[in-house]
Amino acid sequence: MALKPPSLAHWFGTDHLGRDVLSRVIVATRLDLGIAASAVALSFASGSALADRAADEASIRQALGDAKPDSVEPTPVAGLYEVVIGSTVVYMSADGRYMLQGELVDVQKRVSLTEPRRRQVTRAVIESVGEDKMIVFKPEKVKHVVTVFTDIDCGYCRKLHNEMDQYFEEGIEVRYMMFPRAGAGSESYKKAVAVWCAEDRNGALTDAKNGKAIEMKSCDNPISQHMDLVRQLGARGTPFIVLEDGSTQPGYVPAKRLSTLLSQVDR
């Protein structure tokens, strides 16, 4: 047995393999100190990075003034931040001096870093409105949900609405928000308000799109909110369709074609 008590040769004695205990204690202490030093260094580096990011975000927010960003996040490009304001995605330098609006592309991977984020932001903005401020046409079995900005007097909007049974056959729920392109106070706007204020909104919308007279009423309504939102999204015409993943389709899309598009998107 190699165990020996402390002696002049081995101050702490030896272990069961005959190894000097003191030298092993010294080695272990060095390892512990090295690990501790590395942990402290990593902690300082992490803290420094967080401090730098906080300073950059403060500079960007200060540069934007009254335009309050919803989020400021770093991008894979050093010194470049993604800034989301409403439904708009832009990029700014860390000091807040420079702004870029457009696609940020990973050339090596050949993918846009902007488009997925834009879809995510659009989806969040749409969902923030809530179905209680929409007019919803729902099939018995829902497979997909789209949000459609519509103008009662728009020809292709009427065509889409008159084919609602075909959308239902594809399991597509249609959630309407109003976009009277002639603007507030126009006849289209007044019809949109009257539809919203009707006891049966779905029936009133169908009648209005078929050119039938509806009772002109006024009440608290979200039409102006709908119009502000669609402008944020950059829509210029109707119908303007927002898919489940936040991607958009300007113009009329037949039911089967829309079903195919919806089957390809990531929810």
Image: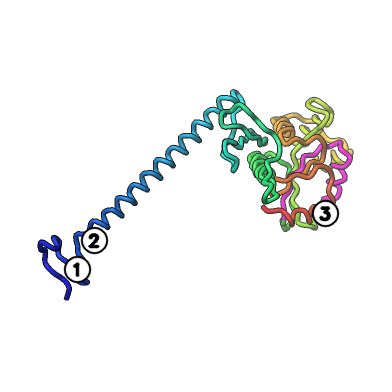
Local packing at callout 3 (Cα closer than 10 Å; few below 14, some 14-19, many 20+) is: few
Image: 13 above or below 216: below
| Disc 1: which residue | 15
Q: Residue 168 appears at what percent x and percent y?
A: 79, 55
Which residue is at a point 83% across and 35% down the rendered structure image? 214
Using the rendered image of the protein, determine whether residue 180 is visible from the camera's viewpoint. Answer: yes
Of mark 1 and mark 3, the one earlier in the sequence is: 1
Whichever of callouts 1 and 2 sits on the residue coming sooner in the sequence is 1
Quadrant occupied by the N terminus: bottom left
Mark 2 Cα-neighbour bin, 10 Å: few <14, some 14–19, many ≥20: few
Cα gap from disc 1 to disc 3, whole angstroms = 78 Å
Q: Mark 1 near mark 2, Cβ–Cβ under 8 Å? A: yes
Segment colored magenta: 144-166
Q: Residues within 10 Å of mark 1 (few under 14, many from 20)?
A: some
Residue 257's tag is 3
Name the foreground residue: 1 vs 87.
1
Residue farthest to the front, as pictured = 9
The type of residue carrying mark 3 is: Arg
Q: Which residue is mark 2?
A: 24
Q: Amino acid at mark 2?
A: Arg
Q: CA distance from mark 2 to mark 3?
A: 74 Å
Q: Is residue 156 magenta?
A: yes
Of tags 2 and 3, the one toward the viewer is 2
Taking the image as shown, residue 41 lies to the left or right of residue 33, namely: right
Query: Would residue 132 be seen by someone viewing this image from the given angle?
Result: no
Q: Secondary structure at mark 1?
A: loop
